Image (cartoon, coloured by chain):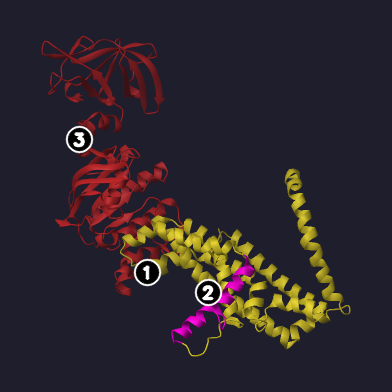
Amino acid sequence: MTRTAALLGPLMLLLGLAYLLPFLGVLRWSVTLPEPGLGQYHAALTDPLVLSVFWRTLRICAVVTVVSVAAAYVVTLLWVRGSPLQRLLVELCILIPFWISVLTRAFGWLALLSNKGLLNSWLMSLGVLGQPLTLVRNEFGVIVGMVHFLIPFAAFPLATTFRGLDERVLMAARGMGASRARIFWQVMVPMTRAGVLGAALLVFVFALGFFVTPAILGGGRSVMAAELVYLRIFQSPDWGLGAAVSVILMVCVGALLALMMRQGRAGGVR
Amino acid sequence: MALSGKASEIEAKSITKTFGAFTALERVSLTVGRGEFLTLLGPSGSGKTTFLMVLSGFEAASSGSLWVDGQDVTGLPAEARGFGMVFQGYALFPHMTVADNIAFPLRVQKRSAADVARRVEEMVAMVGLDGHAHKRPSALSGGQQQRVALARALAYGPPVLLLDEPFSALDKNLRGQMQEEMKRLHRETGTTFVFVTHDQSEALALSTRVAIFDKGRLQQIAPPEEVYERPANRFVAEFLGDINILPVGGEDGRLSFEGQPLTCDGIAKTTNHIAVRPEYMGLHLTQPAKGNAIAARLTDLTYQGAETRMGLTTPGGTQLILRQPTGVLPEGLMPGSSVWLSWPETRAFAL
């Protein structure tokens, strides 16, 4: 016990100094700036602008979660159960972007999707489009960028779930003459339900705090919660409100993490 | 019990299966008769499970062909063969109730809801799981899960039921019970059963015939009495239980062991070894007046309740095993005692 404590000590100290103390500072700002009280929380939860940012954040995160987990499900299925070539391709497609900075990837999407970007110029030169499609500086661009970033985070836990599947159960279903669609929907999906929920929770929590991708691909038009905090603190000096929004975000993330850990203990998420 | 009395005949012709450089099965040919209970027996790595997988269609044979009721099914995948299968570890659907597990193959066949419900009820009753139909597999004991697996595999009345070591996870008492259950199901359904096990007594107790595998080759296929009493080779003889093997020589047209002439019915005089199962040997303190008898010294005595097991050495150094009912043993027997062993002429065979 004491040995464990001694080994974990330095880490705890680092986390305390680097995260807990600053967060306590933010907590203090939220109830002291510009004057002591819960005024900033009241403002955050009534101000139509802040509320619209919260709603947009939730909406984008929900869509991103559903799309990333669904895409990751298919990708992971190929990754774990595909032919050797498929496995290699999927692994490259997951790992290479995973190693590239989030900033680089956001600019990459911008280059691809902007009005004068690759996709639009190509479609227009082919005559498919007369006017460029607006694919960035809106929610669509944000969602594309976030989904691309988050697929690996859903794929890793899902891969663990797929590897833990009892192959014989799937063989049994096949042996009884079940079609591939039936095996997928009635056996595979229900048996991996816990893994899907775990992956979804992880992606959602991660998505809530996204800053760089929405800032670049949203172009200031679809501001999400983290960007709002940035704007309140660095552009319109309103530290109290920025801090209150941070705390609210933190509480949401904390609650979701607690839910995830309870799920994990219940034996659901492996 | 209203079960379709369908039962198929399976013929395997020279089945070979290789995995890379490893040959798992080598030219295995055998026929499983209609309604037969055939056991595939062998040590692990002998190819018995691979052969079952080839029968099921989950593995394709590298060469050879497979025929069911005269139809070539070699290229047919598992889902098209329509066999029932019980997997090692049962492979039940963990997210479905017992009833839904059993209903699964029936729903695949798109039977009407009423038909499915009636059939599920019949199967639940047949395997003795009344009152458990609404439970998930995780709420059942190993033996009950086994029953669900059997019910699911038999639900649509398949012409062949394949079973891969279904009892390996059960304790000894439960095994006995399930063996009885299995015999009853075989009788009631009339289906052809092909059963894989590495347990000799299980194979002898259950089957109409036993196919013994070693190193990817079929060693012998015959009814239980025959493989036990008349094993085709030394591997089969030793795999099926304890056996005493006596090196013999032929002199003056008679076989003899360590200089002692023997009388053996129907054994060629050129044989080098004869074999006798330990339970057919009798123990005497003095040389019996007639019949085959050899002298030996007791080296080891193990009390096992109803039976006592003994290790012996002959003057020539041959090691022997003897099993006797504890109740008939002479008193005062102890390691070091000199004794005589006898056996009926008809119980020895050449190896």
Mark 3 highlights which residue?
B226
* In front of the other: B301 or B8: B8
Mark 1 highlights which residue?
A182
Image quadrant containing the N terminus of chain B: bottom left
Image quadrant of residue A180? bottom left
Q: Is residue A109 magenta?
A: yes
Q: Amino acid at mark 2?
A: Val
Q: Earlier in the sequence, mark 1 or mark 2?
A: 2
Q: Is residue A119 magenta?
A: yes
Label disc, if present, on residue B282 of the rendered structure:
none
Q: Which chain is drawn using red?
A: B
Which dot, 3 or 2, sits closer to the camera?
Answer: 2
Q: Which chain is drawn using yellow?
A: A
* In front of the other: A244 or A97: A97
The residue most toward the bottom is A130
Residue A35 in the figure: left or right of residue B293: right
